[in-house]
């Protein structure tokens, strides 16, 4: 399988490292807008010997590339991703993007998604948008967990995550390093704040039949009292080191859904404990708690979800899909394990734990 990586930032770099560990794929190209990266060897750029000999190309070279799949990681915004996805589709390339606004298109993004679907069907390829959140923790996971529920009355979720692994683009989105007033101005015009919580809420509301007709979002900054450092930014005391964001889903004025997300940079034991929780209130109710590494290693999770989605996407007919429309998500196994090769045996034990012969 021939794969192109479109975007060689923090997330794209992680995707390339994961792909380099597979023997069943061939990385045939890497594209980026950054002039400081174009022309460099991926081995040198990512310190990954398995990627030796692959150079970063400019977007203008896409017409020269032939591939089966492109992993796209350049933007959170549908309007920015739309022409890129379109250029890949026109080349007959299937696309897995981590563009958050395309995960479950809302508002004006619905029209763009419908046009991508039309183009993909005409070209005979498939497109989807995935991630860790949106893409798993607060949406696909609770949607799957609602399967044993006969009815769902409301859903509550909370995610506290370390944003340190994410690159410069995400630092801009969350307002890292700004003053509180600068954060507030950006939050008002929509340029600052985590992208995707509205999309997560929309998917859950629709999938669980909550009849939500309005989503209300709030954003606020977290100000650090100490110096913080990540691989991409240093933050002085008194500046923004994270955010709190919540979305409330209303049905005719009644609250049916509430999601809160807290993103923090360079956390320690003085910050809120990392982790994720969801409560589905219904019949029966379901409680989910996810601890430790997914919240600590969200960047790796995002990259892994994108790579693992490739076989799910290729199993579908041509068109644009939101993630819950594809088959059940799972890891992409590196080797085949068939039911016919699995042996079974049963041993009966006494109450003392000894076998009964």
Image (cartoon, rainbow, N blue to C red):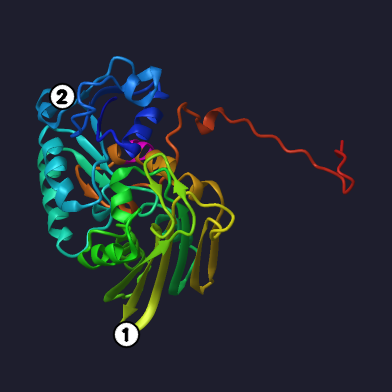
Q: Which residues are magenta?
A: 307-312
Question: Is 130 rendered above or below residue 155?
Answer: above
Question: Is 8 rendered above or below residue 151?
Answer: above
Q: Position of residue 59 (x, y in %)?
A: 14, 32
- Sequence-wise, which precedes: disc 1 or disc 2? 2
Which quadrant of the view contains residue 107?
bottom left
Which residue does the image show at 47% across and 71% down from the upper left?
A: 150
Report whether 222 appears left or right of 32: right
Residue at numbered disc 1: 253
Magenta region, main secondary structure? helix
Question: Is 222 rendered above or below residue 13?
Answer: below
Which residue does the image show at 27% across and 76% down from the upper left?
A: 214
Residue at numbered disc 2: 65
Name the quadrant of the N terminus: top left
Q: Position of residue 2 (x, y in %)?
A: 26, 24
Question: Is 192 rendered above or below residue 229?
Answer: below
Magenta stretch: includes residue 253? no
How many marks the image carries: the answer is 2
Q: Secondary structure at mark 1?
A: loop
Q: Nearer the viewer, residue 55 or 186?
A: 186
Q: Nearer the viewer, residue 302 or 227?
A: 227
Q: Position of residue 323 (x, y in %)?
A: 32, 51
Kindly give the residue lying farthest to the top in the view shown: 53
User: Mark 1: few, some, or many residues within 10 Å (few <14, many ≥20)?
Assistant: few
């Amino acid at each position: 399988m021939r794969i192109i990586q479109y975007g060689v930032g923090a997330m794209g770099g992680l995707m390339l490292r994961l792909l380099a560990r597979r023997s069943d794929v061939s990385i045939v190209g890497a594209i980026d807008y950054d002039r400081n990266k174009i022309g460099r060897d991926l081995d040198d750029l990512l310190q990954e010997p398995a990627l030796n000999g692959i150079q970063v190309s400019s977007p203008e070279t896409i017409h020269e590339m032939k591939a089966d799949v492109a992993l796209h990681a350049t933007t959170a915004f549908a309007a920015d991703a739309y022409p890129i996805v379109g250029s890949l589709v026109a080349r007959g390339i299937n696309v897995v993007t981590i563009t958050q606004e395309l995960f479950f298109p809302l508002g004006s993004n619905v029209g763009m998604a419908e046009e991508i679907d039309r183009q993909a069907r005409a070209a005979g390829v498939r497109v989807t948008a995935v991630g860790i959140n949106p893409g798993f923790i607060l949406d696909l996971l609770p949607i799957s967990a609602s399967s044993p529920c006969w009815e769902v009355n409301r859903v509550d979720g909370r995610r506290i995550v370390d944003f340190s692994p994410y690159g410069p683009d995400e630092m801009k989105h969350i307002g890292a390093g700004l003053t509180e007033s600068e954060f507030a101005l950006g939050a008002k015009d929509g340029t600052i704040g985590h992208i995707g919580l509205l999309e997560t809420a929309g998917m859950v509301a629709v999938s669980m039949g909550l009849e939500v007709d309005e989503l209300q979002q709030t954003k606020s900054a977290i100000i650090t009292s100490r110096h913080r450092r990540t691989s991409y930014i240093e933050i002085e005391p008194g500046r923004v080191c994270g955010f709190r964001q919540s979305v409330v889903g209303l049905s005719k004025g009644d609250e049916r859904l509430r999601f809160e997300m807290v993103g923090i940079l360079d956390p320690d034991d003085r910050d809120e404990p990392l982790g994720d929780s969801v409560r589905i209130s219904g019949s029966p109710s379901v409680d989910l708690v996810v601890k430790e590494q997914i919240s600590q290693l969200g960047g790796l999770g995002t990259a892994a979800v994108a790579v693992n989605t490739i076989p799910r996407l290729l199993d579908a007919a041509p068109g644009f899909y939101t993630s819950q429309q594809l088959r059940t998500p799972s890891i992409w196994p590196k080797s085949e394990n068939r039911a016919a090769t699995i042996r079974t045996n049963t041993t009966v034990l006494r109450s003392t734990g000894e076998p009964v012969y």
